[in-house]
Image (cartoon, grey):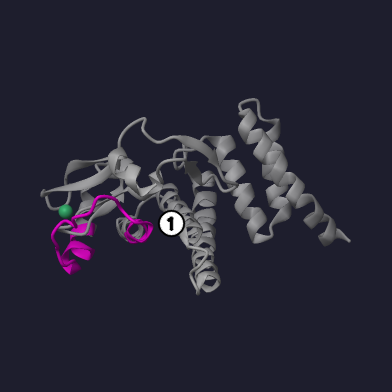
Amino acid sequence: MDINEKNLIIDRTYTCPICDKQFHSKTVKSNSAKFVDTMADLRPIHSNINVTKYDAICCPNCGFAALAKNFNNTTSIQRKLIREKIQSNYKSHEESECDTYTTEMAISRMKMVLLCTVTKGGKDSEIGNVCLKICWLYQDLADEIPDDDPNAQAKRETYLKEADNAGMNAYERLTKARMNEGFPIAGMNETTLDYLLAYFAYKKGEYQTAMQLLSGVVSSRSVTPRLKDKSLELKELIKPKLHEENS
Ligand SMILES: [Zn+2]
């Protein structure tokens, strides 16, 4: 993947809304990622690049970080909060010279986005979206562990535990967003979000909630065939669990 990855990304110049300095961030060239499928938690799989690694934009001068789509959407109050609570404590550094971002780098960049999004009082949908990406990145990190690594099992357990924690935070935030915000939420329409919430409800052992959400998804007129298939697969996983609970 790495040899090709370099050719699929470009350095984009950003002007920071907090410190007004210019910096570069790597971004995936449009239409270059080859989509394969999404996993049960909607983690996107591309054959040639992991696009989630390039979703965080981080200013090396003041520490401000955001998802690309939210980078220029701060209010004056939010900018003030970031200056007081992030910039004042941040040690500026040179832009790192590298061809691609590793998954570890992507996780620390995404955690900086989370810190800034919480600090500025971002919406639940925005915080939930960042938590979801952290959840996906830890799973990607677990997938990258070489088989011959002597600590493979311990590392895998650690990374997947981090993924689960981030996933549960995403579940909590996106559930609140579902009640209080309008769609799209974290880039998702109603059926997609309800499917995702059902998946996390299943992971948490809230099987009744998961089934209720899935019933809404499969009977929705706007559901795509792909999402309907995923929902039916998830229902099959939940049925025996519900059966166990009731027996
Ligand atoms: Zn800055």
Which residue occupies 13% across, 53% down? 19
Task: Say whether residue 119 is magenta.
Answer: no
Quadrant where the C terminus sits is bottom right
In terms of depth relative to the viewer, which is nearer, 67 or 23?
23
* Residue 122 locus on image (x, y percent): 35, 52
Which residue occupies 38% across, 57% down? 103
Residue found at the far front of this picture: 148
Residue found at the far left of this picture: 21
Query: Which quadrant would residue 226 be assigned to in this image?
Result: top right
Task: Say whether residue 101 is magenta.
Answer: yes
Which residue occupies 69% across, 51% down? 209
Q: Which contiguous range is marked in magenta?
A: 82-108
With 178 as the anchor, is 102 left or right in this view? left
* Residue 97 locus on image (x, y percent): 18, 55
With 63 as the anchor, is 112 left or right in this view? right
Can the viewer see residue 128? Answer: yes
Can the viewer see residue 16? Answer: no
Is the residue 231 above or below the residue 96 in the image?
A: above
* Residue 5 locus on image (x, y percent): 33, 44
Residue found at the far right of this picture: 247
In terms of depth relative to the viewer, which is nearer, 145 or 225?
145
Residue with the mark numbered 1 = 134
* Residue 6 locus on image (x, y percent): 29, 44
Query: Which quadrant would residue 193 be assigned to in this image?
Result: top right
| Tag 1 secondary structure | helix
Callout 1 crowding tier (Cα within 10 Å): few <14, some 14–19, many ≥20: many
Which residue occupies 68% across, 35% down? 229
Q: Amino acid at mark 1?
A: Ile
